[in-house]
Image: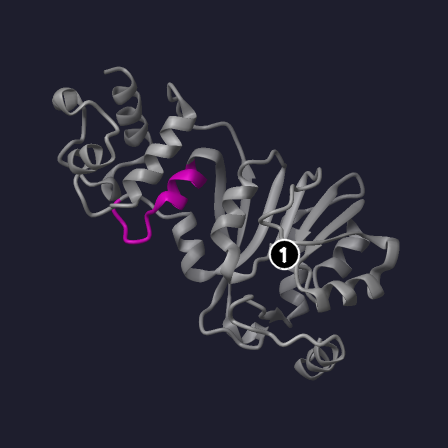
């Protein structure tokens, strides 16, 4: 779809793209085709798409998947999608961060940049076979970052713990309208069993969150600040003089288990 066509549709439905909503529309259909190829749907699948926009992914999904469910927040885009697709898709108007996800086994989205992080964390709470998402390049780097790198984060640890995650291709900003300030990347997510065991998964993930809130501080200092362990018994814990940014997910798991075993 040409930028001139997009402008016409947006004007018709009273939509003004804004940075706050992260509304940058993919205009390269070849990229969209590859995204669907990565997802690899078949007629038995139920696909959940968040933020269908003008339907560049939805059109292809309807040709290749069984059931397509879309969630759209923008009222103008919602009206456009209802008029365009009618009963051929299951359409939900609402905030994908607030409403419960319907049942699905594959997920796809050219994610609005403003909701990438909370949406990915919400997605990881669900069971599914595969997800393909388009995100900012910097965000994609954080998803797959290794310990000791500047991009290593709470997101990196959660992704490693819950799924196989891979950057499938980089997408130049010129492939969008309006053109964003940064390039994007297509990322594949395949859930799997955690690669290591912890005594209490909820405690482990909460610990990850707490530690990365203060990534430049030593573990000892954070545990005292957050009162996560008895200060009189801290001495027996591992990694006290390290910073979380250099600890592997497994090492954070070792610390988590050690705290619970005090």
The residue beneath circle 1 is: 35
Q: Secondary structure at mark 1?
A: helix
Viewed as shown, does residue 55 lie left or right of 149?
right
Residue 153 drawn in magenta: yes
Question: Residue visible at 37% across and 27% down?
Answer: 203
Question: Residue visible at 48% across and 34% down?
Answer: 162
Viewed as shown, does residue 32 lie left or right of 262?
right
Say which quarter of the image contains residue 4.
Answer: bottom right
Reply above or below: 175 against 68.
below
Quarter of the image for the C terminus: give it.
top left
Quarter of the image for the N terminus: give it.
bottom right
Reply above or below: 56 against 198.
below
Reply above or below: 138 against 159.
below
Q: Nearer the viewer, residue 146 or 200?
A: 200
| Other-residue count near label 1 (Cα within 10 Å), few / some / many at <14 / 14–19 / ≥20 | many
Point out residue 90 in the picture as x, y percentages from the top left corner.
80, 50
Question: Residue visible at 15% across and 25% down?
Answer: 231
Image colouring = one colour
Say which quarter of the image contains residue 161.
Answer: top left
Per the rendered image, the range of residues in magenta is: 148-160
Reply above or below: 31 against 146.
below
Q: Is residue 55 visible?
A: no
Residue 229 drawn in magenta: no
């Amino acid at each position: 779809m040409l930028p001139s066509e997009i402008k016409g549709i947006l004007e018709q439905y009273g939509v003004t793209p804004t940075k706050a909503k992260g509304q940058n529309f993919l205009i390269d259909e070849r990229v969209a085709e590859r995204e669907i190829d990565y997802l690899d749907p078949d007629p038995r699948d139920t696909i959940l798409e968040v933020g269908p926009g003008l339907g560049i992914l939805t059109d292809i999904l309807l040709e290749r998947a069984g059931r397509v469910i879309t969630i759209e927040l923008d009222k103008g885009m919602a009206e456009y999608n209802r008029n365009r697709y009618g009963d051929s898709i299951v359409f939900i108007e609402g905030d994908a961060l607030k409403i419960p996800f319907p049942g699905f086994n594959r997920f796809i989205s050219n994610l609005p940049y403003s909701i990438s992080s909370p949406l990915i964390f919400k997605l990881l709470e669900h069971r599914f076979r595969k997800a393909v998402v388009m995100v900012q390049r910097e965000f994609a780097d954080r998803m797959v970052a290794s310990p000791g790198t500047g991009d290593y984060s709470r997101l990196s640890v959660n992704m490693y713990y819950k799924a196989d995650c891979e950057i499938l291709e980089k997408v130049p900003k010129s492939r969008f309208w309006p053109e964003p300030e940064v390039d994007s990347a297509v990322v594949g997510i395949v859930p799997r069993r955690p690669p290591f065991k912890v005594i209490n998964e909820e405690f482990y993930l909460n610990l990850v969150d707490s530690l990365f809130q203060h990534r430049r501080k030593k573990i000892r200092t954070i545990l005292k600040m957050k009162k996560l362990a008895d200060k009189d018994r801290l001495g027996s814990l591992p990694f006290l003089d390290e910073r979380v940014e250099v600890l592997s997910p497994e090492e954070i798991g070792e610390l988590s288990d050690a705290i619970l075993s005090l």
